[in-house]
Amino acid sequence: MNTSAVNPRLDTSSQQPQAKRRWVKPGWFLVSPSVLLLLVWMIVPLGMTIYFSLIRYSLLNPGENEFVGLENFTYFITDSGFIPGATNTLLLVGSVLAISVILGVLISALLEASEFFGRGIVRVLLISPFFVMPTVSALIWKNLIFHPVSGILAAIWKFFGAQPVDWLAHFPLLSIIIIVSWQWLPFAILILMTAMQSLDQEQKEAARLDGAGPLAIFWYLTLPHLARPIAVVIMIETIFLLSVFAEIFTTTNGGPGYASTNLAYLIYNQALLQFDVGMASAGGLIAVVIANIAAIILIRMIGKNLTDKS
């Protein structure tokens, strides 16, 4: 008795050629150069970083390449700037995320809730800071807004008879948070404003007919609808905020002391100011591990959110 005629699933002779044909499709040959280039682009720098993290390598004495194992990692973690840098990194990321999400939701809801003349222009102006280079925006805030003599805030303080404040000297980390939030708030507005346009208007009309007020509609309809976009904003911004550097370098140089130093600037300080490439490479790997842990946690949160919603 021919079992393949009774149960076609047992006939694997026709499945093997199909599996082979999948591998010989032109798509694999077209995509493979890009994949190989991406792997080389990632693996070669990572391999060099791992190599330098395991040796004592200084730019002042490049001929000395003594293998030291995990000594660079120990020195970086026990460095006097590691705890302030890690703390400032967490404060910077958490504060910018809170500002971006809260203000992004409120501004997006206000723009969608009201019709007014020039709303399209307002939308463009709201998202325009996101397209300004970080160095340029940092210089604008440093010289035109935060400057204690000629800045806009100094002029406002003088108008009310108060003494101008040197923000970058007295409140360095808060100043960095304000600058970075100004840059990343438009990204949150763009994502959330786009998501607001897909909200079912019939549900809102039904809620109004049932006597629900604006706050109830916002809390029970708008916020649940924005759960997925908010999770996406948090994930993408967290990955980029962990590596903020240009704003700190342009305005405060990590000071006073370690008051505005984050992990990215601490790694730069070790590599190009103290010329210790080995220790900086170890710090870079530690920062990569922290970023990957944060990304995995956020991806799991988003995946769980999507599963619960579906």
Image (cartoon, helix red, strand yellow):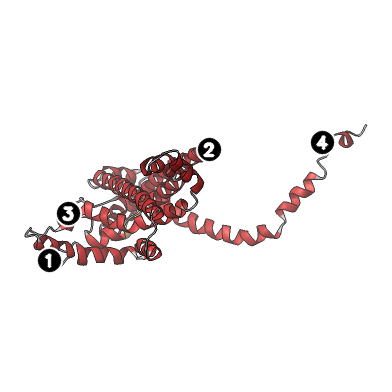
User: Crowdedness of circle 1 by 10 Å Cα count: few (<14), some, many (20+)?
Assistant: some
Residue 29, image quadrant: bottom right
Identified by mark 4, the residue type is Leu
* Crowd tier of the residue under label 4, counting other residues whose Cα lies within 10 Å: few below 14, some 14–19, many 20 or above: few
Q: CA distance from mark 1 to mark 2?
A: 54 Å
Residue where numbered disc 1 is placed: 149
Tag 1: residue type? Val
Q: Are marks 4 and 1 in contact (CB under 8 Å)?
A: no
Residue 75 in the image: x percent, y percent? 29, 45
Q: Type of residue at label 3?
A: Pro
The residue indicated by pointer 3 is: 256
Q: Position of residue 99 (x, y in %)?
A: 31, 49
Q: Which mark is residue 10?
A: 4
Q: Is residue 103 visible?
A: yes
Horizontal side, residue 177 vs residue 116: left or right: left
- What is the distance, in whole Å, between disc 3 and disc 4 at their CAs? 73 Å
Residue nearest the observer in this picture, 54 or 282: 282
Relative horizontal placement of residue 259, taking residue 126 as reference (left or right): left
Label 2 sits on residue: 307
The residue positioned 81% from the left and 41% from the top of the image is: 12
Amino acid carrying mark 2 in the image: Thr
Q: Which secondary structure, mark 3?
A: loop
Q: Earlier in the sequence, mark 4 or mark 1?
A: 4
Q: CA distance from mark 3 to mark 1?
A: 19 Å
Image quarter hosting the N terminus: top right
Can you name the residue that lies furthest to the top here? 1
- Whichever of labels 4 and 2 marks the residue nearer the N terminus, that label is 4
Q: Position of residue 131 (x, y in %)?
A: 38, 64
Of residue 119 and residue 225, the one placed in the foreground of this image is 119
Tell me whether circle 3 and circle 1 mark residues in contact (CB < 8 Å). Answer: no
- Residue lying at 20% horizontally and 63% vertically, measured from the top left: 145
- Say whether marks 3 and 2 touch (CB < 8 Å): no
